[in-house]
Structure formats: C-alpha cells, structure tokens
Amino acid sequence: MRLFLLAPLLVVSCVSSSTYENDMKAKNAEISRLSEEKAALAKKVQETETKARARSADIEVSRTQFKALADAGNLKLKLVDGRVVVVLSADVLFSTGSAELSDKGKAAVSDVAKVCATMKDKRFQVEGHTDNVQINPVPGFPYGDNWELGSARAVSVVNVMIAAGVNPDRVSAASFADTRPIASNDQPEGRAQNRRIEIILTPDLSQVPGFEYLKEAPPADTKPGEPKPQ
C-alpha cells in the first residue's frame, strides 16, 4: 500500500518543483528587465543633465559676449524659452515711421553684428516689433501698415548685419507688428518699449539629432515611391 502512495507523492513533488523553477525564472527575468530599465533611465537622466549643463554654459557664453554692449546701454539682453534675445530700441535705430537706419543705428547694429559673426554655431532671426498706433498710408508713403513697417525695419537690420560679417545663410527677418507687446500701449513710455528690434539667437539646426533625416525626407504630399518635386 505504501508503494502505491509514493507514486502520487513523487508526481506532486515534481510538479511543485517545476512550478517553483518556472516562477523563479519569471521573477529573475522580471528583475533583469527592471534592472535594464533602471540602467537605461539613469543613462537618460545623465544625458539630460549633461545637455542641460551644456545649454546653460552656452547661454552664459552668449550673454558674456554681449555684456560689454549691454553695460554701455546700447542694447538689452533677455532670456526667452531658453534662448538669448538681443533687444534694440527702434527709436534709437530709426526715425518715426521710417525703416532707414540712422547713423547711430547703423553703428549699434554693426557692433552687435560683429559679435554675432563670431558665433559660428548660431543662427539669428531679426524681428521687427511696433506699437499699436496704426499707420495711415498717404501717397508716397512706402508702408501700408505696421506689418510692412516692422518687416522693412527687420530687413534693414539684416542688411547691416550681413555687411558687418554675418553669414547670409545664418540670418533671417520677420515682422510681428504690434502683436507681441512687452509693455502697455496706453502710455507713451510703454509704446516706446514696444517699438523695438529683437535678434533671437537660435542653435544651428544642422546640429540637431535627426536633421539629416528631416533634410532628406520627401514633402508630406509626396506618395511613397514618387520622386521629390524639384
């Protein structure tokens, strides 16, 4: 009778041992997976911290390069969305309603441009901003509204920057008219602050990971297999 009882016991013992081994394998696999995820997360955190430190150092270098001009009162510096912005008063650069740089304005822009020309890893967007006083076009007046005036002023600054040594493919012009005020337009002082030229320092996009893929990718309206439009 005892012999007959041993067989079921052995079977139960073997099944229990096999289940235990499978459970241990599963747990060890889970531990291994979690360890790999932890290592990958730690690596990502370290990379993020390294990039943040490098970005902070880059911002500080940019601010230092313009410090002398800022201390002399020729411009203001501010940080917007992690980018250094050089702010020049339009009233110093231009006459009222004009996009032609004054002699003092040309000198101020040239000084800024000489610093920009040394920054080989940067691109520069020149933005024209106005107050909210609308232009009343008259015969012979070249600008129909504040958009056109802001654009013309930005282009004038770009031309001086290029003449001062900034590579043409690293600079662009844009107009925001009166859509981005930094002060109230209710008072003359506020309107004066809103009339400004901003030069935005941006990273060279060719250094961004994935740039080559984006550069070579076909336009969104191109079907797979079709050649890119020339």
Image (cartoon, grey):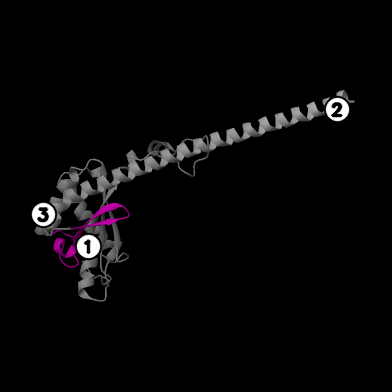
Figure quadrant of residue 128: bottom left
Which tag is nearer the camera, tag 1 or tag 2?
Answer: 2
Image quarter hosting the N terminus: top right
Q: Give neighbour class at mark 2: few <14, some 14-19, many 20+ (Cα, 10 Å).
A: few
Q: Secondary structure at mark 2?
A: helix
Q: Secondary structure at mark 1?
A: strand
Marks 1 and 2, the one that precedes in the sequence: 2
Residue located at (10% from left, 58% from top):
104
Query: In this picture, which residue range is highlighted in magenta?
Result: 76-101
User: Residue tagged by mark 2?
Assistant: 5
Verify CB contact (< 8 Å) between mark 3 and mark 2.
Answer: no
Residue type (three-letter) at the residue carrying disc 2: Leu
For label 3, the residue is 107
Spot occupied by residue 152 in the image (x, y as percentages of width and height): 23, 58
Which quadrant holds the C terminus?
top left
Is residue 141 covered in magenta? no
Q: Which residue is mark 1?
A: 196
Residue 29 pos. (x, y %):
58, 33
Crowding around mark 3 (Cα neighbors within 10 Å: few <14, some 14 to 19, many 20+) is some
